[in-house]
């Protein structure tokens, strides 16, 4: 094969790859575009057969109905507060636990870590009843604290941070110990700054999971003003009919903060996943 024909073959292969990627992107983005367009339609337009992508005229009444049906800003505050507390707590606690499992030597370390991993394999619904009884005994039902408390620590976060700490060179700690640094000082001044990509990845995972949590808020809170946005949006669905434009408008407004968060921290997130050993 000549150099010219090889170059032509590479060019065709590259065009094929680009075509496949564009088709994949279109398939991924199309539902989001459909959601945006539906939020500007009237209810009859949303139910047309065959369906139409664009509305006849852009309507904002669906967004007005969302604010009329649910206490949107109260739910937004609950979501932000709950996500913020959970994210900060998980980054702190899971970093400490991950470092301990990665670098400290203590009895039954591997056994305890396997037990921790086993928690990840148990469906979370199994914990609903005992956790609800604990919240009831503490008098926390119908409070934001009840919605937040179970997510302050996670087995997955500990696993993620352990994997990240394992990638950091031991020579850094050994050099610090030779200089007389204590274990606590090594953790806070040397290891933790190096673990920022992993901490950002954990923060994004925690924020996404907490923002979209649906079942637990409904179980422990009956006051609409104490529910998060995911639970609030689910309550927009009627029992007999569904106002699709209103559902699309509400879910779109609920998604925007997480989309912006991911866009801002995208680079750090990918870096954290790549260096923690979770990338396939």
Image (cartoon, rainbow, N blue to C red):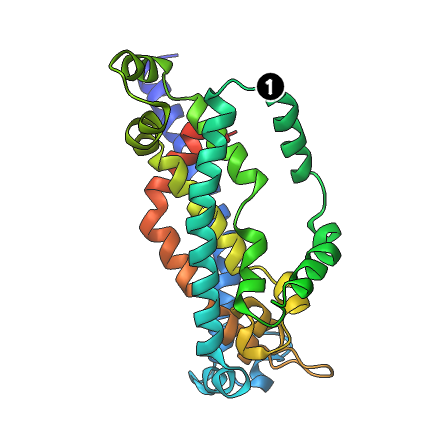
Q: Residue at x 59, y 74 (%)?
A: 51
Q: Is residue 248 left or right of residue 118?
A: left
Q: Residue at x 67, y 81 (%)?
A: 238
**Residue 242 visible at all:** yes
Q: Is residue 87 left or right of residue 223?
A: left
Residue 182 rendering spot, x and y as whole percentages: 33, 22
Q: Nearer the viewer, residue 89 or 123?
A: 89
Q: Nearer the viewer, residue 32 or 196?
A: 196
Residue 272 rendering spot, x and y as whole percentages: 40, 35
Q: Residue at x 31, y 15 (%)?
A: 177
Of all residues shown, which one is farthest toward the left? 179
**Image: 2 above or below 194:** above
Q: Nearer the viewer, residue 20 or 265?
A: 265
Q: How many marks?
A: 1
Residue 149 rendering spot, x and y as whole percentages: 56, 56
Element marked by disc 1: loop
Q: Which residue is mark 1?
A: 107
Residue 63 rendering spot, x and y as whole percentages: 46, 82
Quadrant for residue 128, please give it.
bottom right
Rate crowding at label 1 as few (under 14), some (14 to 19) or many (20 or more) other CA atoms within 10 Å.
Answer: few
Q: Quadrant of the N terminus?
A: top left
């Amino acid at each position: 094969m000549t150099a010219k024909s090889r170059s032509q073959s590479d060019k065709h292969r590259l065009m094929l790859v680009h075509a496949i990627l564009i088709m994949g992107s279109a398939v991924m983005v199309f539902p989001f575009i459909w959601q945006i367009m539906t939020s500007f339609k009237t209810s009859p337009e949303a139910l047309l057969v065959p369906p139409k992508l664009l509305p006849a005229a852009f309507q904002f009444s669906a967004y007005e109905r969302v604010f009329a049906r649910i206490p949107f800003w109260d739910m937004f505050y609950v979501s932000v507060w709950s996500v913020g507390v959970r994210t900060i707590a998980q980054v702190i606690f899971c970093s400490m636990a991950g470092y301990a499992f990665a670098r400290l030597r203590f009895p039954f370390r591997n056994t305890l870590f396997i037990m921790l991993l086993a928690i990840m394999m148990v469906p979370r619904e199994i914990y609903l009843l005992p956790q609800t009884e604990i919240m009831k005994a503490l008098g926390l039902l119908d409070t934001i604290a009840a919605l937040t408390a179970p997510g302050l620590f996670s087995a997955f976060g500990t696993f993620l941070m352990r994997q990240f700490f394992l990638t950091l060179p031991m020579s850094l700690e050994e050099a610090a110990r030779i200089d007389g640094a204590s274990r606590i000082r090594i953790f806070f001044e040397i290891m933790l700054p190096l673990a920022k990509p992993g901490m950002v990845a954990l923060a994004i995972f925690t924020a996404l999971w907490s923002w979209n949590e649906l079942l637990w808020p409904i179980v422990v809170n009956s006051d609409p003003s104490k529910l998060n946005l995911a639970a609030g949006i689910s309550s927009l669905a009627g029992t007999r009919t569904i106002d699709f434009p209103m559902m699309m408008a509400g879910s779109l407004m609920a998604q925007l903060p997480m989309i912006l968060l991911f866009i801002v921290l995208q680079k750090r997130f990918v870096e954290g996943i790549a260096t923690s050993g979770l990338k396939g």
